[in-house]
Image: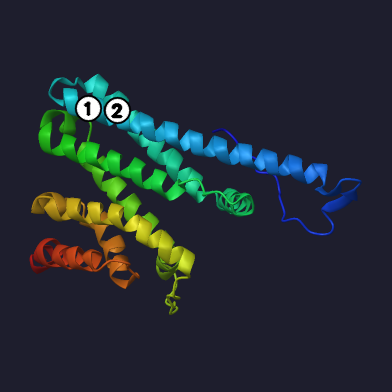
Amino acid sequence: MDSIDVPEVARSNNDTEKSSGLGITRDDSEDDNLQTAAYVVSRVKGHLAIQLLIIQVVTDLYKMHWRSLSVGTVDVLLEIYSSIALHSHQLNSETTLQLKLQRACTILEISDPPMVHFENESYQNYLNFLYDLLMNKPSVSTEKNIEGELISVCVEVLQMYLDCAGLRYITQKAASSPMVHWVLPLGSAKKEELAARTPLVLSVLQILASLERDLFRKHISQLFPPLVDLVRSEHSSREVQRILSNIFQSCIGPVIMQL
């Protein structure tokens, strides 16, 4: 969607109601805003549903024909997965849009557009596609540098999780300043979002834990900083800490011992 403009809407009060011979009615402009807001929310939900449907169709086609896919076809699939994942992240990064949609949905008493779900599904399918190429199509994987793209997407997902946990700002500042930074407890909304993002992070950690030792060592400079921040992060599931501990013991530990 090129642009989304959600009109400002407000709950009814004495200023937005006026009397008539038939009783109390809403101001026409408020009714127009409510109708427009409902339309925009509906359009956003429809847009997300279509994007998710595209992902599902592409994934189903890949599963049926993966053995015979040409490099050119893989290029097309990579573009579809990456563009939808990027789009989902951009939508979730629009804080003002998110607040307007939430406000409109609260007033209209309807559910919010599933933005985080859209982002999770987009990146999960993207990761699955890259990992499957890496494991099952080595020639294509080498030619298209699937290994590097998989690691980059894994780091991106970890960073999104850390952003939600309030750790990205701390990490960036720590590189240039020796000041002590406190990690503040998350509010209920952020805790809920963090819980929603947990399955995707678990998927990333499972992928990283399954990589060959030499491959992991090759990309450790990219992986080590976000993994360290994950240790400090708040988690909604103990499974994150369990797999993270396994990665440090079986993947990072041996690399450090060889230094």
Amino acid type, residue under disc 1 in the picture: Tyr
Image point 42% across, 50% down: which residue? 116
Using the rendered image of the protein, determine whether residue 4 is visible from the camera's viewpoint: no
Q: Which numbered dot is residue 62?
A: 1
Q: Tell me: residue 164, above or below residue 148.
A: below
Within 10 Å of disc 2 (Cα), the crowding (few <14, some 14-19, many 20+) is some
Camera-side residue: 142 or 195?
A: 195
Q: Position of residue 150 (x, y in %)?
A: 25, 43
Q: Which residue is situated farthest in the right direction here?
A: 21
Using the rendered image of the protein, determine whether residue 147 is visible from the camera's viewpoint: yes
Q: Quadrant of residue 159?
A: bottom left
Q: Position of residue 7 (x, y in %)?
A: 69, 44
Q: Quadrant of residue 63?
A: top left
Q: Which numbered dot is residue 52?
A: none
The residue carrying mark 2 is 58
Q: Tell me: residue 127, above or below residue 221.
A: above
Task: Judge from the rendering whether residue 106 lies leftward or rightward of residue 183; answer left or right.
Answer: right
Determine contact: label 1, label 2, CB under 8 Å.
yes
